[in-house]
């Protein structure tokens, strides 16, 4: 980064556009990150929840088959059978989940790892920029979001600001 800083300010950034300056900074930063920041491959877990036992899965399978039959036949008897299986399956799923949760929480004094593992699995983190609303339209693609945000913030970065900060030098720990 120190090399980038000296090259950047020596190349008169005020003569280039903001986009060119941004691209050169972004390239230097990404190459520095790939060079110095360690990475780890994380495997996604496609495991079933612990509480989803064989009997619960079997009940779900029966419920889905009954729903398919009720939809296909349209008979009142099949629909009633599906509703009964749906209610039983919902109760069974809820009971299995509660039993497993009570097992984890009830064992909190002896083994805290299971409790914290359960809490961690419930946490959800969003990564990235959510869909943006522009003039009552939603923007989903990354390129469109970038263009929208670029248009919105482009008025902030002008040539006056670039020339005003051209002689500022960085003394952070990354640059040394």
Image (cartoon, rainbow, N blue to C red):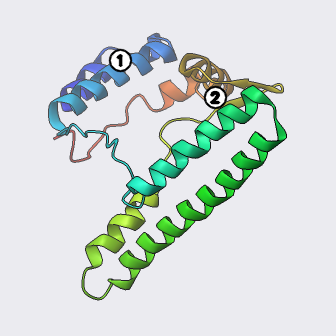
- Side (left or right) of 50 relative to 99: left
Which percent across, then down, holds residue 145? 61, 23
- Front-lying residue, 41 or 78: 78
The structure residue drawn at horizontal position 76% and vertical position 28%, both measured from the top left corner, is: 73
- Front-lying residue, 32 or 166: 32
Label 2 sits on a secondary structure element that is helix
- Front-lying residue, 61 or 51: 61
Vertical side of 117 occupied by 36: above or below? above
Label 1 sits on a secondary structure element that is helix
Vertical side of 90 occupied by 171: above or below? above
- Front-lying residue, 9 or 17: 17
Question: Would residue 23 be visible to someone looking at this image?
Answer: yes
Crowding at dot 1, Cα within 10 Å, few <14 / some 14-19 / many 20+, comes out as few
Say the numbered circle drawn on residue 24.
1
Q: Quadrant of residue 106?
A: bottom left
Residue pointed to by mark 2: 153
* Residue that protrudes farthest toward the front in the picture: 77
Crowding at dot 2, Cα within 10 Å, few <14 / some 14-19 / many 20+, comes out as few
The structure residue drawn at horizontal position 21% and vertical position 39%, both measured from the top left corner, is: 175
Question: Would residue 124 be visible to someone looking at this image?
Answer: no
Which quarter of the image is occupied by the N terminus? Answer: top left
- Side (left or right) of 72 relative to 168: right
Vertical side of 88 occupied by 99: above or below? below
């Amino acid at each position: 980064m120190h090399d980038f800083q000296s090259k950047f300010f020596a190349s008169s950034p005020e003569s280039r556009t903001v986009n060119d300056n941004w691209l050169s900074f972004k390239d230097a930063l990404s190459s520095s990150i790939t060079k110095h920041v360690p990475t780890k491959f994380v495997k996604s877990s496609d495991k079933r929840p612990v509480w989803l036992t064989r009997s619960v899965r079997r009940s779900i399978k029966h419920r889905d088959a009954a729903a398919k039959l009720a939809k296909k036949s349209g008979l009142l008897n099949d629909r009633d059978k599906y509703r009964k299986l749906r209610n039983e399956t919902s109760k069974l799923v809820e009971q299995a989940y509660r039993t497993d949760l009570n097992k984890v929480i009830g064992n909190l004094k002896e083994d805290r790892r299971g409790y914290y593992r359960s809490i961690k699995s419930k946490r959800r983190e969003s990564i990235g920029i959510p869909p943006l609303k522009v003039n009552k339209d939603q923007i989903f693609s990354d390129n469109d979001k970038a263009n929208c945000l670029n248009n919105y913030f482009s008025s902030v970065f002008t040539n006056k600001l670039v020339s005003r900060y051209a002689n500022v030098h960085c003394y952070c720990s990354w640059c040394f």
